[in-house]
Each structure stands twice: as C-alpha cells, then as structure tokens.
Image (cartoon, rainbow, N blue to C red):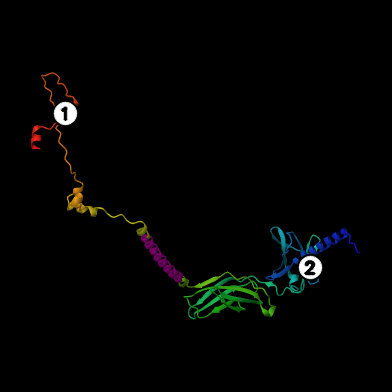
Amino acid sequence: MTYIHSPRLYFGLVFLILSFQQCLSEAALSVKCKIINYEYVECIWHPNTSAMNYTFSSAFANDSLLDCPEYVLEHNYTVGCRIPLKSPDLDHRFTKFKTAVFTEGNHTITVFDSLQRYVLLNPPNNLSLIWNENKSTLLLQWNSSIKKCVVYMVRNQNDPSQTINVTETSYSLSQVSQKKHYVFQVRSSVAVNCGPSDLWSNWSSPVEWGSAESSKGTWQGLYGILSVFLLFLLVLFLCYCERERIIFLTVAPDPSKNLQDLFCKHNGNVESWVHISKELKEAFEPDYTEPSCDVCEVTPSCDAGPTPVASPASQTDECDEPNAAEEQSS
C-alpha cells in the first residue's frame, strides 16, 4: 500500500498552480506592431493581468535589442512603445523585427517576419473641388505626405456604397448635377505593386459641393406635413375635450327666458302662470268663520281725575258678549 506525504502533495499543487498562472500571463500578453506612415514603428501590448509597468526592447534583423525610446502610457501604465525609423533603419524596415517585453522576472519575445503588411498611412489632407461648367465635370484634388506607392479610395458620403480606387492625387467626376449635394472623403493605403498593406488610413475630413437646397427643401416639406398633422391632432383633441365637457359638465339653462311669461303675460300672478286648477285652489281656502271681536279703548279726560283701568277680565267679558243687533240678525 502506497502512502503520499501531505507536505509533498501540497508543494506539488502550489508549484503546478504557479506554473499555470505564469503560462497564462505569458500567453495573455500579445504584442501587435505596425509602421505609421513610414515614420516610426508603434507596438502595443494588452495584458489581461493586473495593471503593471512593462519594459520593452526591439531590434531589426540581427541587431542587438535596444530599449524603448518613447513609451505609450495609459492610466500611468506602459501599454506600448514608439520606435522612430531613422535613415539606417529604412533599408531593412521590412526585414525581421524582434520585440521583447519584460516584467518582474518574466519576459515575452515576439518575432515578426516582416512589417510590410502592417503599414498604416496618414489620411490625405487639403481636399479641394474645381467645377467645370462647360463640361459639367467636378475635379477633386488632395495632398498626401507619401508620394509613391500609394493607392487612394474616394467615396461620396451621401452614397458610401459607391467607392473608387485611384493612384493619382485627383479624381474627376463627370455628369455632375448642381442640384445634388456631394460630400467627398478620401483614404489611402500602400499600393499592390509596392507590397500591399492590410491597413487603410482613416477617412479624411469631408469636403462638400453642390446645392444643399434640395435637401433643405425636402426637410422643409417634411416639417410642413408634420406641422399640419400636429394641427389636425390638436383640433381633434379640442373637439374631444369639448364633447367630454358637454357630457359631464352640462351647462345650466338661462332662467330669464322662462320668467318672461310670468311678468309679461300674467303680470306677476304666479297662480295663473303655473296654471293651478280650481279644485286645488279651493282646497287651500278655509271653510270656517271666526266671530269678530271689537276692541274698546277708553280715552282719558283732561279735567277728570285718573280713570281707573278696567281689568282684563271685564274687557274680555264685554268683548265676548255679542250685542243685541247681532243676536237679532242671527
């Protein structure tokens, strides 16, 4: 029966983990280099490990490695290097190129057979347009810092699907309509006969020509249609709001029209205005009689002394007794 000592097992596991992490860090570090406008070589590395500073060295052909003269920084960490192409380097710039990246005891060496397919030119500049009214042609011209072994791609920004490649620093467009609007852009790359490059430069700054009134007129027409449509929606909304107001908030009728007959035809007689029937009117009339009561008032004389005030009982008895005339008439 075989026994495995636990310290040896732990040591072996730790060694394997550290070796695996080192292999991953070296494999994750990739270096990509390209020649910028035949002026300098730019190498960029993007590690997937934690942020740290790297030391870079490079050399053409069989030359010895030289330290990076100018680092590219990102968030204060080195992520690339720029190596100027001096006169001695121009002769063997498309030979083997070797790079080495060092960090904390680890290093990554990358060898490029040639940087010929990784040449990135600067975009053309100073674009200008010349109009020939007699021939209805438009001549597009531009400048480039590289004069030889360059191919250019021309496009109309309003129709990017149509592009054309030219080797000269000009392009003539025939049968041009002044009513159309053109926006030209140009980019450049290394020509095929000089060793083609896989990289195209950025597009140049646009240059415009033609009448932009057609596009403005189109937008103005769209704005007019949109305004009419919004006005129509506003009218529908107001009609809907008015309908809801009539249904839920009915307007109180004017009472002056109904009261005109009361004052004009019936002279304010409410009974005749409301047409009360005779039976209803007689129902409210009293059907009993009450005896009349005479109130006697004694006028005092100036010469006589104070007149005794009759007691309330005597006055009541006197008023309650009917006189002889009333009894005879009854």
Please provide percent x and percent y for residue 19.
82, 63
Please provide percent x and percent y for residue 23.
79, 65
Q: Is residue 85 visible?
A: no
| Mark linked to residue 109 | 2
Question: Viewer-proximal residue, 84 or 59?
Answer: 59
Split into 4 quadrants, where in the image is the N terminus? bottom right
Q: Seen from this angle, which residue lies furthest right?
A: 1
What residue would you read off at disc 1?
317
Q: Is residue 226 magenta?
A: yes
- 247 left or right of 105? left
> Mark 2 or mark 1, which is nearer the start of the sequence?
2
Q: In the rendered structure, which segment of residues is drawn in magenta?
A: 216-243
- When asked about the image quadrant of residue 316, the answer is top left
What's the residue at 74%, 70% (across, down)?
A: 87
Please provide percent x and percent y for residue 95.
76, 74
**Few, some or many residues within 10 Å of mark 2 (<14, 14–19, 20+):** some
